[in-house]
Image (tube, rainbow, N blue to C red):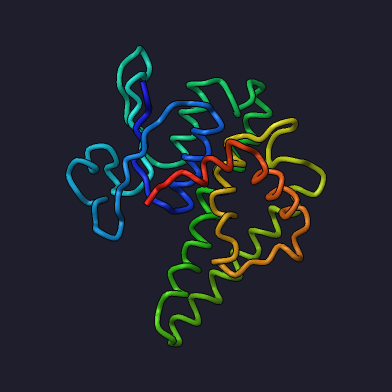
Amino acid sequence: MSIELYTYDTPNGRKISVALEEFGLPYQVRIVDLGRGQQFEADFLAISPNNKIPAIRDPDGPGAQPITVFESGAILLYLAEKTGRFLPRDLAERVAVYEWLMWQVGGFGPAPGQVHHFLQLPESEARDYGVKRFSTETHRLYRVLDARLAAREYVATSGEPSIADFAILGWAWRHERHRVSFADLPHVAAWYERMMSRPAVQRGFAVKLA
């Protein structure tokens, strides 16, 4: 049975389409049109009480019972636990994945998301302040990521990516939109090319989400 993916064409939405392709799980897209306010409708609220995409409904959840999961980080952890993939068994290695997944959901997402927001506002002192504040933090986060990738292929694991890579990639995909060039981030650039060359990643970005 297919997982139902409730989503839209955003970085957080793309995290999960990419992950589902990488996990090789069958899924059906249920587009939640944010521009039309569908995230506030009662049917979606029953799945995602925070009115945010993405969310999933897995008809074959624990004990062969249906389950719904909201919040992109929780979805990634659920899918990893369900399949036994992209999350190491060794606790020390798992901790690294947890750290970088939380780094993404707590910072490398909220900060560039605010850049997106303020850039859309009319010219004003408040707009300039917001762009400067959140651009500074976004660039700092990219430098943290570049340093992390200096001597490794993937953010938290070796040999193959983890769910942390899928989470971070969803936002790195929009680097041009939040005015970040990879010219001074060689390790991020190499990682990004490595990730985007994966066939499953390409399918996850190609699937229609809007």
The picture places residue 27, in percent across and down from the top left corner, at: 40, 30
Specify the farthest residue to the left.
42
**Residue 199 against residue 137 in the figure, above or below:** above
Residue 99, placed above or below residue 59:
below
Q: Decide if residue 96 is on the left or right side of residue 106.
A: right
Residue at horizontal 52%, vertical 26%? 24
> Can you tell which quarter of the image residue 3 is in?
top left
Q: Residue at x 64, y 46 (%)?
A: 196
Position of the N terminus by quadrant: top left
Count of picture labels: 0
Q: Quadrant of residue 86?
A: top right
x and y percentages locating residue 73 in the rendered image: 47, 40
Left or right: where does residue 33 sit relative to residue 22?
Answer: left
Residue 149's place in the image compared with 157, above or below, is: below
Q: Residue at x 66, y 63 (%)?
A: 140
Residue 58 location, x and y as percent?
35, 26
Residue furthest to the bottom in view is 124
- Left or right placement of residue 143 versus residue 73 in this view: right
Query: In the displayed image of the protein, which residue is found farthest to the top?
Result: 63
In percent of width and height, residue 99 lies at 61, 40
User: Could you tell me which residue is drawn at 51 percent across and 55 percent down?
Assistant: 109
Q: Is residue 190 left or right of residue 172?
A: right
